[in-house]
């Protein structure tokens, strides 16, 4: 039956198992480093800081207050846009306030949110504080780990009777 379906151009998996994204939680792959900026910094300060930090050129920047309470996300293209007043605070650029994920959410819901909102990163919140950052690279690490684990498992057929 599977062969007939495959000849019609429908992909059929060789093995059946649960979806890797559905069974993995955000807390398993999110990490606690990334570009998080205080909402009291001026646009000019953040621009200058990012220009001097060669390794930190993110597409999105997470904004928090002094206590780590999540305020929102801004894009770097918006930050470096020329029509902003440089003395304004970075918080004035926030347009995406309600985009975040919780540690107990599945990676599938994170992928859906990232796709829907066209985001490369998601802040991971515990209550109102940012506890981590989730990126596409984090999610791909799960596939890499699963691939390596499956490569080590080999099927053995015993020929002894």
Image (spheres, rainbow, N blue to C red):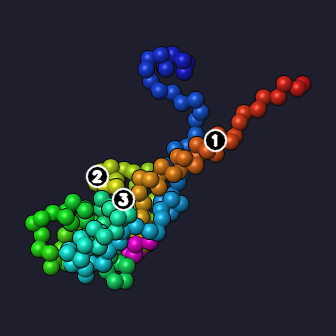
Residue sitting at 32 percent across and 74 percent down? 37
Q: Is residue 5 above or below residue 115?
A: above
Q: Which residues are magenta?
A: 127-131
Labels 2 and 3 touching (C-beta < 8 A): no
Residue sitting at 48 percent across and 65 percent down? 31
Could you say which disc has been placed on residue 118 in the image?
2
Residue sitting at 76 percent across and 32 percent down? 156
Image quarter of residue 78: bottom left
The one nearer the camera, 118 or 89, is 89
Could you say which disc has been placed on residue 121 in the image?
3
Image quarter of residue 63: bottom left
Which residue, given by chain and number where applicable, does mark 1 sit on?
Answer: 150
Image quarter of residue 100: bottom left
Q: Is residue 94 above or below residue 14?
A: below
**Element on which disc 1 rests:** helix
**Element on which disc 2 rests:** loop
Residue 120 drawn at (x, y percent): 34, 55
Quarter of the image containing the N terminus? top right
Quarter of the image containing the C terminus? top right
Residue sitting at 48 percent across and 49 percent down? 140
């Amino acid at each position: 039956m599977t062969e007939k379906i495959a000849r019609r151009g429908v992909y059929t998996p060789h093995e059946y198992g649960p979806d890797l994204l559905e069974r993995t939680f955000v807390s398993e792959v999110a990490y606690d480093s990334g570009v998080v900026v205080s909402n009291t910094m001026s646009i000019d300060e953040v621009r200058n800081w990012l220009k001097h930090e060669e390794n930190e050129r993110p597409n999105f920047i997470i904004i928090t207050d002094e206590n780590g309470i999540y305020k929102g996300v801004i894009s770097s293209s918006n930050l470096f846009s020329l029509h902003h007043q440089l003395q304004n605070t970075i918080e004035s650029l926030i347009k995406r306030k309600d985009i975040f994920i919780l540690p107990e959410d599945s990676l599938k819901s994170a992928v859906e949110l990232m796709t829907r909102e066209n985001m490369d990163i998601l802040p991971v919140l515990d209550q109102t504080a940012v506890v981590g950052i989730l990126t596409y690279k984090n999610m791909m690490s799960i596939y890499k780990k699963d691939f390596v684990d499956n490569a080590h498992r080999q099927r053995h057929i015993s020929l002894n009777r």
